[in-house]
Amino acid sequence: QVQVVESGGGLVQPGGSLTLSCAASGSAFIDAMGWYRQTPRKRRELVAFITDSGRTFYAASVKGRFTISRDNAKNTVYLQMNILKPEDTAVYYCNGVLEGLDVPPWDYWGQGTQVTVSS
């Protein structure tokens, strides 16, 4: 069964930091795991992913500010977000990633966690 549970979102001032966590069921914790985000005005986009070997990818809009990591023993993925900007405001989702397509390999999404960057 595929299941992910995201946590760690909240309200933060511009320039602040947050760390998101994602606990994935065994079958959902695949080689490439990523964080996506979505706002009411934009389609869901891939923000970052990390492979089992530790190779990472970041969208240009977050590169240098966000860091993705994973703990394979705990089936958990993290997203450390620094120097947050108002445009980072979105619902953040954790999911598997099909490299090259930047979408999950299945039609399933968790509930996500809301990140709001505002003064």
Image (cartoon, rainbow, N blue to C red):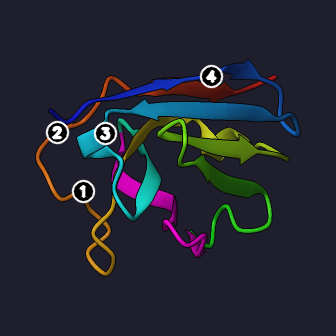
| Residue at the disc numbered 2 | 108
Q: CA distance from mark 3 to mark 4?
A: 21 Å
Measuring 77% from the left and 43% from the top, which residue is drawn there? 84
Q: Earlier in the sequence, mark 1 or mark 3?
A: 3
In front: mark 3 or mark 4? 3
Q: Earlier in the sequence, mark 2 or mark 4?
A: 4
Determine whether the residue tagged by mark 3 lies in a helix, strand or loop.
Answer: helix
Which is more toward the observer, 55 or 113?
Answer: 55
Q: Residue 114 at x, y = what percent?
A: 52, 24
Mark 1: amino acid:
Pro
| Residue at the disc numbered 3 | 26
Residue 53 figure quarter:
bottom right
The magenta region covers 41-57
Mark 2: amino acid:
Tyr
Residue furthest left as drawn: 107
Which is more toward the observer, 46 or 49?
Answer: 49
| Residue at the disc numbered 1 | 104
Q: Residue 78 at x, y = what percent?
A: 62, 42
Mark 4: amino acid:
Gly
Q: Residue 40 at x, y = what percent?
A: 35, 35
Mark 2 neighbour class, 10 Å CA radius: few under 14, some 14 to 19, many 20 or more: few
Measuring 82% from the left and 35% from the top, which residue is drawn there? 17
Mark 4 neighbour class, 10 Å CA radius: few under 14, some 14 to 19, many 20 or more: some
| Residue at the disc numbered 4 | 8
